[in-house]
Structure formats: structure tokens, C-alpha cells
Image (cartoon, grey):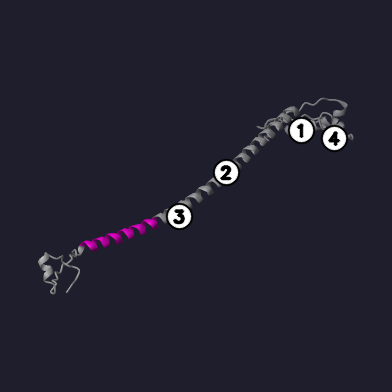
């Protein structure tokens, strides 16, 4: 508080019940200006009956950025609005949890399908390797067969020495299966 500037004096109503208020006013005036003296010193020496303030006797004013409290009807509406928002948030959370659960189930299902497909792919690769090995063996066998000279059957003509009469009758078939 700046003591060079005089403080504004409070104006209170003067009544029989406000003697304490007057004393308060005088005290505040003395604090604000050092030259101000009480005009009624005899009132300060008399015993004063103290009276306490009851609820609702003093109006309350809020200073600052905060809004004053809303009347009861507005607070009921605000409370109902907040409850509705809370219910909507809870419903949205429940829906999100259900969607998350469904997504997790779908993810597990897809991972299982991928695992089965990988196993099937590995089995197909093994089959393809076996088929390639068998094809390579068959090709190698064909190459070996093609590399050999072909076998030609040799015919051996065997003459029958004991039957000369048969020779006269005509040529006899060659018995090539007989070897000497």
C-alpha cells in the first residue's frame, strides 16, 4: 500500500446496530491517512456487544476471471448435461473396446492363416525340390543312354551239316538266335 496517497474512506450506514461498523470505519480511515483522527473518542471506550455475521447477510462478489456460480436451475441443467456427456463418453469407450477386441480377434485369425500359408509354401518348395531332383536324375539317365552306342544284334548263320537234302529244297531260315 502506498502511504503517500490517501486511501479512500469507507462509507457505512450509521445506526444503533452499526457501532462496530463505525469503529471499523474509523480504524480504516486512520490507517489510510495519518492525519485523520477519530471525531468520537467516547464511543471507542464503551463496551461493544459483538455480533457475528450469519449466512446470507453479506453479499459475495467474486473478483477475477472466474465466472460467478450459476443459479441452482442452471447448475441442474449443467449437471444433467455433464451426465449426458459422461454417458456418451462411456458408450463411446465401450464401442471402442468392442472394436479393439474384434480387431485383435481378426489379427489373430489372419496371423494363423499366414502361418498355415507359410507351412504350405514350405511343403510346396520341398515338393518342387524333389521333383527337380527326380527330373535331373531322369535327364542324366537319358543322357547316359544317348551317349552309349546302340546295340545291334549279330546274326550268326549256322549251317546244318547233316541234312543235305533239305538244302536242295530251298533256302532254309537262318537261326540267328543260336551262337556258335
Q: Secondary structure beneath disc 2?
A: helix
Q: Residue at x 79, y 33 (%)?
A: 27
Kindly report which numbered mark, 1 or 3, lies closer to the viewer in this rendering.
3
Measured Cα–Cα span from mark 4 to mark 2: 66 Å
The disc label shown at residue 10, or none? none
Question: Looking at the image, is mark 2 or mark 3 earlier in the sequence?
Answer: 2
Residue 86 pos. (x, y %) = 67, 36
**Mostly what secondary structure, the magenta segment?**
helix
Q: Quadrant of residue 173?
A: bottom left
Residue placed under numbered mark 1 in the picture: 28
Kindly report which numbered mark, 3 or 4, lies closer to the viewer in this rendering.
3
Question: Looking at the image, is mark 4 or mark 1 earlier in the sequence?
Answer: 1
Q: Quadrant of residue 29?
A: top right
Residue placed under numbered mark 3 in the picture: 119
The C terminus sits in image quarter: bottom left
Q: Secondary structure beneath disc 1?
A: helix
Question: Dot 3, crowdedness within 10 Å: few (<14), some or many (≥20)?
Answer: few
Residue placed under numbered mark 4 in the picture: 52
Q: Quick one: which residue is furthest to the left in this view?
A: 168
Amino acid at each position: 500500500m502506498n502511504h503517500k496517497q490517501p486511501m479512500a474512506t469507507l462509507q457505512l450506514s450509521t445506526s444503533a446496530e452499526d457501532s462496530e461498523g463505525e469503529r471499523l470505519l474509523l480504524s480504516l480511515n486512520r490507517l489510510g491517512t495519518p492525519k485523520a483522527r477519530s471525531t468520537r473518542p467516547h464511543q471507542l471506550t464503551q463496551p461493544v456487544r459483538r455480533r457475528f455475521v450469519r449466512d446470507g447477510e453479506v453479499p459475495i462478489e467474486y473478483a477475477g476471471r472466474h465466472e460467478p456460480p450459476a443459479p441452482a436451475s442452471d447448475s441442474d441443467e449443467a449437471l444433467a448435461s455433464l451426465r449426458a456427456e459422461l454417458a456418451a463418453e462411456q458408450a463411446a469407450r465401450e464401442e471402442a473396446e468392442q472394436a479393439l477386441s474384434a480387431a485383435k480377434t481378426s489379427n489373430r485369425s489372419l496371423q494363423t492363416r499366414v502361418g498355415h500359408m507359410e507351412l504350405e509354401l514350405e511343403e510346396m518348395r520341398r515338393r518342387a525340390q524333389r521333383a527337380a531332383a527326380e527330373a535331373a536324375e531322369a535327364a542324366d539317365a537319358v543322357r547316359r543312354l544317348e551317349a552309349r552306342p546302340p546295340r545291334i544284334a549279330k546274326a550268326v548263320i549256322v549251317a546244318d551239316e547233316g541234312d543235305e537234302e533239305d538244302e536242295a529244297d530251298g533256302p532254309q531260315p537262318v537261326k540267328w538266335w543260336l551262337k556258335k
